[in-house]
Image (cartoon, coloured by chain):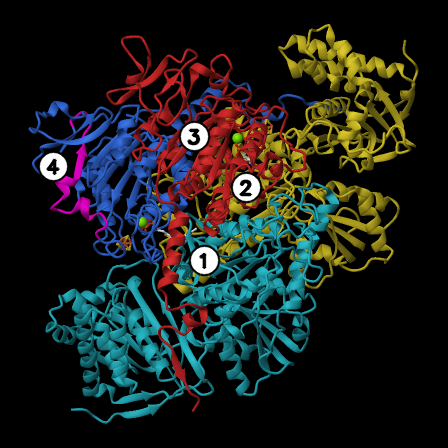
Chain colours: A red, B blue, C yellow, D cyan
Amino acid sequence: MAEGKIETGTLTRQDFKLDTTVKWCAGCGAHAVLSTIMNALPETGVKKENVVFVSGIGCSSRFPYYINAYGFHSLHGRASAIASGVKTANPNLSVWVMTGDGDSMAIGGNHFIHIIRRNINVNIILFNNKIYGLTKGQYSPTTPKGSITKTSPDGTIENPFQPGELTMGAQGTFFARVVDSDPKMMKDTILKAAAHRGTSVVEVLLNCVIFANDVHKSITGKDVRDDHQIFLRHGEPMIFGKERNKGIRYNCNKMEVVTIGENGITEKDLIVHDATDPDDSTHYNLVRMGLPEFPVAMGVVRAAESTVFESLMHDQVQEAQKKTKLKTVDDLLRSGNTFRIDDE
Amino acid sequence: MAEGKIETGTLTRQDFKLDTTVKWCAGCGAHAVLSTIMNALPETGVKKENVVFVSGIGCSSRFPYYINAYGFHSLHGRASAIASGVKTANPNLSVWVMTGDGDSMAIGGNHFIHIIRRNINVNIILFNNKIYGLTKGQYSPTTPKGSITKTSPDGTIENPFQPGELTMGAQGTFFARVVDSDPKMMKDTILKAAAHRGTSVVEVLLNCVIFANDVHKSITGKDVRDDHQIFLRHGEPMIFGKERNKGIRYNCNKMEVVTIGENGITEKDLIVHDATDPDDSTHYNLVRMGLPEFPVAMGVVRAAESTVFESLMHDQVQEAQKKTKLKTVDDLLRSGNTFRIDDE
Amino acid sequence: MGKNPKIVQREDVVVKFAGDSGDGMQLTGSQFSDTSAFIGNDLSTFPDYPSEIRAPQGTVAGVSGFQVHIGHKEVTTPGDQADVLVAMNPAALKANMKWIKPGATVIIDIDNFDNKHYKKAGYEEDPLHDDSLEGYNVVKAPITNLTRDTAKQFGLDQKTADKTRNQFVAGMLYWLFNRDIKLGEDFLKDKFKSKENLVKANMAVLHAGYNYAETIEALSTTFLVDPVKNKKGLFRNMTGNLATAWGLLAAAEKAGLKLFLGSYPITPATEILQEIAKRKHLGAVAFQAEDEIAGICSAIGASFVGRLAVTTTSGPGLALKSEAIGLAVITELPLVIVNVQRGGPSTGLPTKTEQSDLMQALYGRNGESPAIVIAASTPANCFDYAFMAAKLAVEHMTPVILLTDSYLANGSELWNIPYTKDLPEITPPLVADNDETYQPYLRDPEKMNRFWAIPGQEGLRHRVGGLEKEDVTGMVSHDPMNHQVMVTNRQKKVEKVADYIPQLEIIGEPTGDLLVIGWGGTYGGLISAVTDLQKTGLSISLVQFNYIHPLPKNTEQVFAGFNKRIVCEINMGQFAYHLRSKFQQYEFLQHNKVQGLPFFIAELKEKFIEILEGNHQPNE
Amino acid sequence: MGKNPKIVQREDVVVKFAGDSGDGMQLTGSQFSDTSAFIGNDLSTFPDYPSEIRAPQGTVAGVSGFQVHIGHKEVTTPGDQADVLVAMNPAALKANMKWIKPGATVIIDIDNFDNKHYKKAGYEEDPLHDDSLEGYNVVKAPITNLTRDTAKQFGLDQKTADKTRNQFVAGMLYWLFNRDIKLGEDFLKDKFKSKENLVKANMAVLHAGYNYAETIEALSTTFLVDPVKNKKGLFRNMTGNLATAWGLLAAAEKAGLKLFLGSYPITPATEILQEIAKRKHLGAVAFQAEDEIAGICSAIGASFVGRLAVTTTSGPGLALKSEAIGLAVITELPLVIVNVQRGGPSTGLPTKTEQSDLMQALYGRNGESPAIVIAASTPANCFDYAFMAAKLAVEHMTPVILLTDSYLANGSELWNIPYTKDLPEITPPLVADNDETYQPYLRDPEKMNRFWAIPGQEGLRHRVGGLEKEDVTGMVSHDPMNHQVMVTNRQKKVEKVADYIPQLEIIGEPTGDLLVIGWGGTYGGLISAVTDLQKTGLSISLVQFNYIHPLPKNTEQVFAGFNKRIVCEINMGQFAYHLRSKFQQYEFLQHNKVQGLPFFIAELKEKFIEILEGNHQPNE
Ligand SMILES: Cc1ncc(C[n+]2csc(CCOP(=O)(O)OP(=O)(O)O)c2C)c(N)n1
Ligand SMILES: Cc1ncc(C[n+]2csc(CCOP(=O)(O)OP(=O)(O)O)c2C)c(N)n1
Ligand code: SF4
Ligand code: SF4
Ligand SMILES: [Mg+2]
Ligand SMILES: [Mg+2]
């Protein structure tokens, strides 16, 4: 069992419960994330004192105050940068970045793409409510074009980021998407994120009841969700729909939605999801896929192997320590060109 | 003829010549970019007083000092942010961002992805020498993994960004790649960038003779360039090679290199380059394509239509001005709830 | 029905509305303010709310409040303590008990005063049944139930019905302040406009509250506050943030420039961005950037191409803008940086007020990097200082930092609406096309500003940038003596601004025992305290600094007139530190408070009397 | 062959090497320094180079230089002016004429003195044939040709051959300074190691230069500088940046912590990052971040998890780090921020020296945000102050800003190598696992620091962050009085550091006419000037501040001992401003220079004499 690892089942949700008032609005999707993570942590096999939550600023970023772990509520946009230091300094810790769409896609965009590029082994939980919640309702880089918000009285004119697309563009090795209203899907996916070696990005489509209520409704609504979401499972064909009779296949190099049983289509024609494919072209297509033509991809879109920054760093450190003759600072100070001067 | 536009041919290279010493190292690829842009500008049909160069900090960012135009040598990483202000404030100007891989991919990464997302109509010329030149040779976010540089004595351990991939991930509408040693390709491409409505990113594979000499040699070397580059032309099949007998096709959803005349392959089997395809999946594959399996894509990979931020902004302004009853600040001050108080 | 209440005529009254974040207290507060303004009262308001959006209902953390001070006399602060408190639940009562006057009228929604709510509010005992409310006039109104009863007929669901409770409160206050309920009706018509059913329901509840107040015993005494003396003209109720936005719009119009705002949302500055975003009809462009750095950089870009360029933020954002302010300093481009101060350090107390960014504004940049620093001192004069910030920036070709604070930004006061023709002219130092004498760093001999040649202009192509430039020509220069010259030029240019700003005005006698020194947003409290004491015959005067760097030319002369000087600030003594260095010859006492709150008049008076009586320990 | 030169014994000599950026002058300079150190001279060096990498050959903009001052007497600066100038081309001559002493020996590469080169250098007339070199001992050596001749035999192409020209120069200087040429050979063997042919070629050229010097008439007088007096032990030649890096490594080892550096390259601080990146063998981790903000944030993250966390930068980078420094202040985590100052504002003069980030270091943050500020004063003592910065950060749980500057960073001096066992102990305030009394903001009653509980430790889980926290418990708190308490605690904690730092040492008499006050990197110039004047019997003393905030406890007492005080700084008077405010009772004269250059001893002496003679206009 690796350093810092314990048997799963040793801990329970209670071990992470903090005696404090959770101050999100009633009905906010963030409550579900908190609850799911408290349920998931005992199953990660990480010692409770090895869990660190780092967040930026925003409603979502208050997360660390609500869970019994080591926590760092830092600066707006900087959670990934701080977490990079935490994890690089001590790779034994289980590090979680709790962040919002403003926090990570607006002010924190640069740290977001760089932690992904380096593939530092942290789990980024992106609370995507497509709005700035804490500052009371300005548009964010993920707000749907045309939305009227406090800073876009005439409708936004910016093309929104797709967090998944940006993740791929930044060399991402893990991307998953979940909705706040499906705790099972969320827990399942978050555990996969935790298990992934490298930066895991989990986009939570989250409802802000106050400033962007129902922004995800066309995806998450009870009546439409089965037809508008496809829950991807590695190794399984891409099937969805209330009737589970729809699927996705490649028509030469373009994806398309097909109905099983129509035009001679069978399950065999569908794409079998390979989250681990080093080539991310299909993953790139999957994260960009959307309504009305396609369902929205849920679950783990990509989980590919690559080198992990902090492991390579510590390998280099160990290698250097093994090879060096300069074991201490005293050795260093006396190495190379030195001159003895004797008083006349 | 649109505002600020003039007949091409009215101006010459001389109109942009500045009587100053160009201080790049002898042999630096930047000289070629300067020369090409001075040749290209007269062909853009822009009045000389409407051309603005904005740069960050780095060897490449000294560019504005060497050309007779309005110029702004700004802060490290901030050229895109400053240019966003320049262009949004005055859409009639022809705005060029001259930047390095450190400037735009490291410290300036966030402004880079946001200007692209907004699709502000500027031309970004990215001098990608895969090193920090001005600070004398530290690795950059595009430095090939394993490189030994001043800050990576044991070899870098970071996965480099692919500027094209990041551009796509950020909703890019235009991406092109050129080499410093092919002025014709560069001019041709830069003119297309200038003509594109939206953010154009032109990656120049540029040789830094001092700190990363020959970093692009496997692509640009005289002996290999024909086989290792494919110059993409919109509407033409993807052919390359010294013998012009190699091509790229889709084998179902994966690209592959084929030889015309072998196994019954003809030109017809090859992908016809469609730079304007709104769906960027093929473009995404093209920018990621690389040695040894594939040639490196050169020329305009993507040039798709989309809305342009500053145009929409000024549309909204005009619309508001047309509709309002509050024409002046005096009107505004007296609008809504006012109260007359009469002294007793 | 109806009783004949005893009417008490009052010079001023302070009312505090408090409830859950969702209870609409801000709305009732505004409604009360508007009505007061309509009938001609002077007024000053201040909201106070938690940094969470909707902290759990019924908890002290979730209490949101709004204080209104109205006067027949001139009022300059929202008031230290309330004469009337409306507390919608036990948490609201608990949070506000220390901010009400002895004998105050306390209106509570008795429907929320039960064990469940006591517990949530952290009460150990029922506050209505211990002696904690002794000495107050407690009005136990069944607000929730009566509202629901009234709203029922309009078919509203309970959640929506409960949202009209604030109109019950409003109705009670109309009665309590002897006001025409029609004003309340008009407010509602305007507020809900086309939503007819909502207008009707709210109106019915308003009347229910009014009638209830009329009936009950506990409200047998009512207040009458006559229209304000000495104010005449057309007024509106202005918050500091709105005034700032409008001042910038006015400056753009006067200067003949288009307004460009590059900004990123941050409490408590966001409303300025939101307001400018609404003013496209005046040609203004608001660019919501990806972060504060892009906010200021886009503004610098816009300034380069000839716009009136502005960026707005609060403390942490100002920190992020430091580097770019330096760029504006060295490129000598006009730029207004509005910093709405809040509690620090770091994220600190984001919804609370503080004056602790002064040193950052003065010196938070690398190198010798002088900028003009000015500060507004009342919600409404944010208009004037925003206007002045723009005028100085443009005319002197330099960044100007305008400091306001959370207290000014969210607080409001009556504002006598000016005509733009009466505002000072703004004359940008533009250059004619093809002016052959143009050189990027040639200076106006008077102000020492360089000139503003705008991309797109013919024959003026030039280059600016962050590297040191040669005097006059603007070529990159590493020459030692040139650097000395340029550093000195930039400094002198800013110092010369002293010739273009007003002198300090002394409030009170020009000589005396004690000079109270304030700057920025503390004006309301300080002037109240000082004038009160002046009336008691004490030898005390006030100067409030709006111009921080450079200082007004008569500063030293003003200081000379007094035996003692005390600098009062909502920080640990930053302006005092600055003044000590600039005026080494004078001793400066300090009064500082860093509690996220403005000064209270009572505490100030106590302090000043202590000093005047000689009991003060210097610089404790 | 061979002549018997006249040998002049000298207390000290200053040599300046100047040529194109590619001419290897930095190498020849280092070689000369090493040899000098080897034979026991004291020394001080300073490179000076343009901000472009290889500005066009032969232009003044492209000149790169290296100055070496060696001494039998102790030397503290690289010297105002040179006794020997080596100028590889006309541009190098032109750029350096004003920095050489009357009668100096000027060695030029005559092969580059032709019309083409004159024009490039901007000479209007041939400087060898007007009277501009009158009074100097000009040695016109055909360096290029003789080098090529010599190198030919090794089959080097011309470009490579020309790169060995610097060894011709080196050879001449070995002869000129009566040194054993074997030292030069050893240097080359070490430098080029396995590249045998290069070693041989360079050696041959070295000898050629030596022989040439021996032959020619113009070098009939040679110098002898004896080993330094009063220095004994094992030395090395240290630059400030190297010393800073090593001081941090030493501190980590002493504290039993791993070193974590989060940084982003920026001139002139980059070498510290480069050096730490090489020290993985000591367990150090250097994280080259995507920008300065990520640099400091990664370090704060590392500090949170128990590392000795450091970030390094220069002025513009410090500006970018402002917000995050505030986070370290409020979370009370140890952090060392090294700021290597350069010419500002903005990008300014990136390769030149300045002391103009003092106010930014003290106050460049939002809110009341106190941090410790200290400054190194010589290249080698960067080691000590980097060590102290780490010690104070860790023991007092606070960010510490260490100021050095371009002059210290790139300059070098002989350093007497210490043993780490003789360095002070560093004791981090760690907490035992499962300590039930642990609370995040419980404080040590002495130092007032909180304690450092490290993620991974059992039973100490807690949360920190940028919002204001409740005293002791560390819960988020918006309570007014708590904020006041916490603001005061953070301030007091930093002020208490005064009890743990050394007192000021006066150089010279503790009382007298004039006290010269310096801080940081001006020490070398100031001590030379002051001790020179002391020898002439003037009543003058020096204090050099290394501790800026808090100030040493005896500061006021030191100031009291003198009739006049003058603050000398490479800025417009930032420390003077600070001192005036802190010590209002004293007048402070100023001497300031903002030219990207250090003080010259001659200018200082002139200034001090002027004041002592009473001819000084106060604060002109
Ligand atoms: C440097 C800085 N800039 C701006 C802010 C103001 N601010 C706080 S949270 C926030 C955005 C919140 O949006 P998001 O990250 O989506 O979080 P949410 O509240 O929606 O969960 C902003 C702009 C700040 N605290 N610090
Ligand atoms: C805020 C800031 N950080 C760091 C620097 C130092 N710096 C100047 S240029 C540069 C990187 C240059 O690399 P790149 O952008 O690739 O340009 P190149 O010189 O290679 O053309 C750095 C780190 C700076 N000037 N300002
Ligand atoms: S404002 Fe929105 S995001 Fe914030 S806590 Fe409330 S519901 Fe959640
Ligand atoms: S250092 Fe490299 S990038 Fe910079 S000017 Fe020289 S060759 Fe060009
Ligand atoms: Mg959000
Ligand atoms: Mg580069």
Q: Is residue D63 left or right of residue D273?
A: left
In space, the residues marked 3 and 4 are separated at their CA atoms by 40 Å
The answer to the question of whether label 1 and label 3 lie on touching residues, with beta carbons closer than 8 A, is no
Q: Are marks 4 and 1 in contact (CB under 8 Å)?
A: no
Q: Which residue is mark 1?
A: C486
The mark closer to the camera, 4 or 2, is 2
In the rendered image, residue D275, in percent from the top left (x then y), is placed at 39, 62
Same-chain status of marks 4 and 1: no
Amino acid carrying label 2: it is Phe
Instruction: Report, in whole angstroms, how far the alpha carbon at label 3 lies from the one at label 2.
Output: 19 Å
Instruction: Please tell me which residue lies in front, B31 or B321.
Output: B31
Pointer 2 indicates a residue of which chain?
A: A
Residues drawn in magenta = B214-237
Q: Secondary structure at mark 3?
A: strand
Q: Would you say D440 lies left or right of A176 here?
A: right
The residue under label 4 is which amino acid type? Gly
Q: Position of residue D254 (x, y in %)?
A: 53, 67
The chain ID associated with circle 3 is A
Position of residue C478 relative to residue C398, above or below, is below
What residue is disc 2 on? A53
The amino acid sitting under disc 3 is: Ala
- The image shows residue D217 at horizontal and vertical percentages of 20, 88
- Is-magenta flag for residue C202? no
Q: Is mark 4 within 8 Å of ligand 6?
A: no
- Can you identify the residue that label 3 sits on? A176
Q: Which residue is mark 4?
A: B241
